[in-house]
Image (cartoon, grey):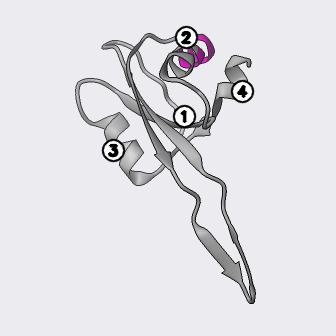
């Protein structure tokens, strides 16, 4: 599994944006593979973004039940990783905006 398979994409919401802007340490949220471990996520973020990671916290979410007419199904389960960076390191997604 390559580092680009572990990290799906950044999870950009109001809450994650406020966490990244406030506080002494920057915290960034990513959607990651469901079977990825904290060590794999840490290595992937350090290699892709060239930063030092201090802490990784993960949360798993079950997919919601959805229906359309008589048909019903379930969205896939997913996993979110909160990455806390060491002081002096930063990941910017919207630099010129």
Name the residue that disc number 4 marks.
5
Q: Which label was assigned to residue 80?
A: none
Range covered by the magenta-colored residues: 44-49
Q: CA distance from mark 4 to mark 2?
A: 17 Å
Secondary element type, mark 4: helix
> Is the residue under label 4 in contact with that under label 3 (CB below 8 Å)?
no
Name the residue that disc number 2 marks.
50
Asked whether residue 29 is drawn in magenta, I would say no
Quadrant position of residue 73: bottom right
Q: Residues within 10 Å of mark 3 (few under 14, many from 20)?
A: few
Secondary element type, mark 3: helix
Secondary element type, mark 1: loop
Q: CA distance from mark 4 to mark 1?
A: 19 Å
Quadrant position of residue 26: top left
Q: Which label was assigned to residue 18?
A: 3
Q: CA distance from mark 3 to mark 1?
A: 13 Å
């Amino acid at each position: 599994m390559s580092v680009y398979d572990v990290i799906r994409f950044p999870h950009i919401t109001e809450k994650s944006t406020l966490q990244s802007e406030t506080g002494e340490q920057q915290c960034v949220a990513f959607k990651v593979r469901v079977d990825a471990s904290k060590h794999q996520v840490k290595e992937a973020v350090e290699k892709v973004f060239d930063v030092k990671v201090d802490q990784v916290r993960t949360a798993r979410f079950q997919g919601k039940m959805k229906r359309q007419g008589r048909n019903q199904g379930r969205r896939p389960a997913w996993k979110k990783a909160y990455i806390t960076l060491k002081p002096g390191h930063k990941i910017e997604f919207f630099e010129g905006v």
